[in-house]
Amino acid sequence: MSVESHINQLEMRHRSLDAELNSITVSPGVDQTKIAELKRQKLWLKDEIHRLRKKQLVH
């Protein structure tokens, strides 16, 4: 798998998590633990995308 296709997959997962977050935050009885976990996952994905893009520029 190329780096660019990996980045694309990570970006798709990031968008998916964003959509999931949007849908659960409008629901009554929101599980704050679930929201926190989704946000952590989104942040990790964002950092990983940034790291891979930076690495791509160096090489």
Image (tube, grey):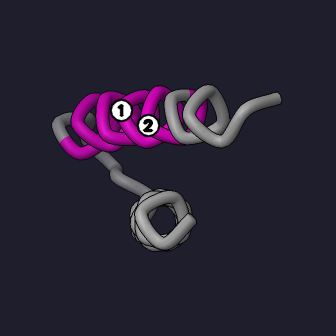
Q: Classify residue 55 by image quadrant.
A: bottom right
Q: Are marks 1 and 2 in contact (CB under 8 Å)?
A: yes
Residue 28's disc is none
Count the labels in the image.
2
Q: Position of residue 53 (x, y in %)?
A: 44, 59
Q: Position of residue 29 (x, y in %)?
A: 34, 49
Which quadrant of the rendered structure holds the C terminus?
bottom right
Compared with 59, 14 (above or below) is: above
Neighbor class of circle 2 (other Cα within 10 Å; few <14, some 14-19, many 20+) is: some
Which quadrant of the rendered structure holds the N terminus?
top right
Q: Secondary structure at mark 1?
A: helix
Please give the residue where the numbered disc 2 appears in the rendered image: 11
Residue at the far front in the pictured view: 59
Left of 24 or right of it: where is 57? Answer: right
The residue segment tinted magenta is 9-25
Majority SS type along the magenta span: helix
C-alpha gap between disc 1 and disc 2: 6 Å
Between 21 and 49, the one lying in front of the other is 49
Q: Position of residue 21 (x, y in %)?
A: 33, 43
At label 1, the amino acid type is Arg
Please give the residue where the numbered disc 1 appears in the rendered image: 15
Compared with 46, 17 (above or below) is: above
Q: Classify residue 52 by image quadrant.
A: bottom right
